[in-house]
Image (cartoon, rainbow, N blue to C red):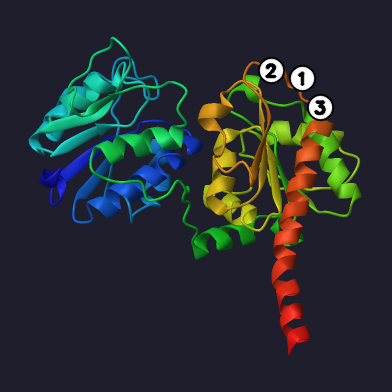
Amino acid sequence: MDELAMGRFVLVRALMGLGDFLCVTPALRSLRLAYPSAHIALVGVGSTRALVMRYSHLIDEFIPFPGFPGIPEVPLDVTRLPPFLAEMQARSFALAVQMHGNGSSTNAFTVLLGAKRTAGFHAAGAYCPDPSLYLPLDEEEHEVKRWLRLVAHLGAPAQGEDLEFPLSETDAAVLARAPEAAALGEGYVVIHPGATDPARRWLPAHFAAVADHFAAEGRQVVLTGTADEAPIVAEVEAAMRWPAVNLAGQTNLGAMAAMLARADLLITNDTGVSHLAAALRVPSIVIFLASNPRRWAPLDRRLHRVVGRDGLQPDDVAPGQVLREANLLLALRGAHRARPVEAARREVARA
């Protein structure tokens, strides 16, 4: 699509989840490398502005989503929508790309942005604005691969499937100011028991049993979560027999990422945090109870292990299942860290 080379285009991704955004970063990278001179704007939920603009190397502009019928992430304000659409249409974007869900409502919103052309996915039998640029939706396709397939169709070949999360010096500084941060060592195990949907939450007692196992081995255990998740984290801590560092509610996203980057392992039932671990190359165990691992689990199954599946109850996954996978990952991580030392010893021996 040569008309995009120097043009402006707008992406629609008005989802609130951390994982929702991290899963499109490979597609954003592909777009940027294919069209380095293009101006790329993203329409997103206002609360995600700071996250999106962390990716200033991929996104040039953030545009707050005003709400739209059938898109529940933002309450519809009918007084805001007409002037928003008029302003967007006046900008004459070269391309608007729907990267939000199955397109049942977002395809209509994307068309109303007034770009010269639009692209995205459409469900079988649903509205398809442009058969040449809209692809049939596969509900089982992994979220990362889905958007890579779309941008490849738009002339932006995949530049790898790795997720991105840029860290800054500010992130480390904010972490250092957290009251419990001084107690952090190195190579700890992070337990993240929170999840937005209660159906996805593993039992606090099970998290506590897993945490106690590692604490009893002499590993430091770090409990983490947002301020809203602090009560769940407190339940885990209360059920533990060994002490842990509790950072719940003490860090913003960047500080939590800085903390996680120094970990040996993450154990969570939250896919957003699991994708953050994937972006930071930190091994993880992801417990699935009410979401689809085929679509949402990290792609690298050597570094990230899935326990459970969609449709399970919280007690259907036992702590022993998680510990078996965790110990395998920790053994692999230890072997990986030992290899440079062993190689150096062989060099010395040969000399």
Q: Which residue is mark 2?
A: 312
Residue type at mark 2 is Leu
- The residue carrying mark 1 is 316
Q: Determine the secondary structure under disc 2.
A: loop
Marks 2 and 1 in Cβ contact (< 8 Å): yes
Report, in whole angstroms, how far the alpha carbon at label 2 lies from the one at label 3: 12 Å
Could you tell me residue 247's position as x and y percent?
A: 69, 47
State whether residue 16 is above or below residue 302. above
- The mark that comes first in sequence, 2 or 3, is 2
Residue 141 location, x and y as percent? 45, 27
Q: Residues within 10 Å of mark 2 (few under 14, many from 20)?
A: some
Mark identifier at residue 73? none
Label 3 is placed on what type of residue? Ala
Q: Amino acid at mark 1?
A: Asp
Q: Residues within 10 Å of mark 3 (few under 14, many from 20)?
A: some
Q: Position of residue 63 (x, y in %)?
A: 27, 39
Residue positioned most to the top: 125
Picture layout, residue 31 above or below residue 320:
below
Residue drawn at x 37%, y 51% is 159
Q: Secondary structure at mark 3?
A: loop
Question: Within 10 angstroms of label 1, few (less than 14), some, or many (20 or more) residues?
Answer: few
Which quadrant holds residue 89? top left
Residue 184 visible in this rendered orientation of the protein = no
In the drawing, does residue 318 fall left or right of residue 99?
A: right
Quadrant location of residue 234?
A: top right
For the C terminus, give its image quadrant.
bottom right
Q: CA distance from mark 3 to mark 1?
A: 6 Å
Point out the residue furthest to the bottom here. 351
Q: Nearer the viewer, residue 272 or 246?
A: 272
Kindly identify which residue carries mark 3: 318
Q: Element under label 1?
A: helix
Query: Residue 19, image x and y in percent?
Result: 50, 37
